[in-house]
Image (tube, grey):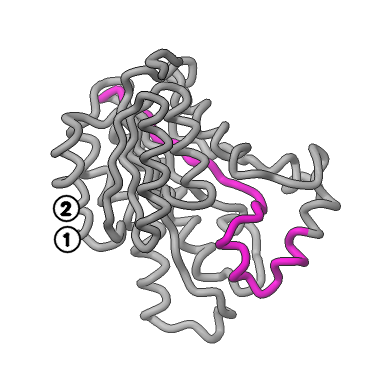
Amino acid sequence: MTTNGPLAGKVALVTGAARGIGRAIARKLAAAGCDVAVNYYNSHEEAEALCAEMRALGRRACAIKASVGLPDSVDELFEELKKEFDRIDILVSNAASGVLKPTMEMSLKHWRWCMETNAFALTLLAQHAAPMMPAGGRIVAMSSLGSVRAMPAYGFIGASKAALESLVRSLAQELGPRGIRVNTVSAGVVDTDALAYFPNRDQLLESFAQRTPAGPSLTPEDVAGAVYLLCLPEANMINGHTLVVDGGFAISG
């Protein structure tokens, strides 16, 4: 059991933390010393197992079910969180959802689903978290290369990620004077459970492997490392930035 680490004593909330990239982020922050609130929606057993893992490190951890795009559900999330923690030092807005269909087949319902879960959620979370954040607080939103690139069946999700990155810039401007830094981590192609839903999964992985100068694969741990870097005190003057973690894929034509 250890209590030291570069982020020792910090409290983090990670949304969508039970699986994939969110789980890797929660683990990384816990290893660095953070106590962690694990938000999930469907993956209760995975969330509880992750909390048990972090408690074994000597961290405080709790699992909280909530749908981050719904105001009432986010209200309930923070009510539960406040039973365990009196502040938040790090907020990672990672939970995401959407519809993988051609844009020409999409509806208003699909638009709302993508925008509310992937973009509006950041606003809801920030509105609740910022009043609980001391100076030095960090908000990190998770985006993807689809925010700036056209990808098959990704139109509405990509639009929601572009909106997310724009919101990050606005929040960075508004919260910066309060000592809170707001940034984005935009990840390349990571082979998680979520990628299995992509109709062109194999093509995406093959293209990434062929065109990435830094190596053929990108792991959730690689992405988690970038989030961790933005949470360090040394990143205090990084604000409103989108940090791309893709091994150089996007620069390769």
The crowd level at tag 2 (other Cα within 10 Å; few <14, some 14-19, many 20+) is some
Secondary structure of the residue carrying numbered label 2: helix
Q: Tell me the kind of residue under disc 2.
A: Asp
Position of residue 24 measured from the top left corner of the image (x, y, whole percent): 52, 41
Instruction: Indicate yes or no whether the magenta region holds residue 200.
Output: yes
Residue lying at 48% horizontally and 28% vertically, measured from the top left:
230
Q: Which residues are magenta?
A: 178-205
Residue lying at 77% horizontally and 53% vertically, measured from the top left:
208
What distance separates the C-alpha of mark 1 from that of mark 2?
5 Å
Position of residue 98 measured from the top left corner of the image (x, y, whole percent): 46, 69
Position of residue 201 measured from the top left corner of the image (x, y, whole percent): 70, 67
Residue 139: numbered disc: none
Q: Tell me the kind of residue under disc 1.
A: Asp
Asked whether the viewer can see residue 40, the reply is yes
Relative horizontal placement of residue 117, taking residue 151 as reference (left or right) = left
- Image: 146 above or below 227: below
- Image: 91 above or below 191: above
Q: Are marks 1 and 2 in contact (CB under 8 Å)?
A: yes
Instruction: Indicate yes or no whether the magenta region holds residue 101.
Output: no
Q: In the displayed image of the protein, which residue is found farthest to the right?
A: 210
Position of residue 120 measured from the top left corner of the image (x, y, whole percent): 32, 57
Asked whether the viewer can see residue 176, the reply is no
Residue identifier under label 2: 75
Residue identifier under label 1: 72
| Most foreground residue, 183 or 11 | 11
Residue lying at 34% horizontally and 64% vertically, measured from the top left:
116
Relative horizontal placement of residue 178, taking residue 2 as reference (left or right) = left
Secondary structure of the residue carrying numbered label 1: helix
The crowd level at tag 1 (other Cα within 10 Å; few <14, some 14-19, many 20+) is few
- Image: 192 above or below 6: below
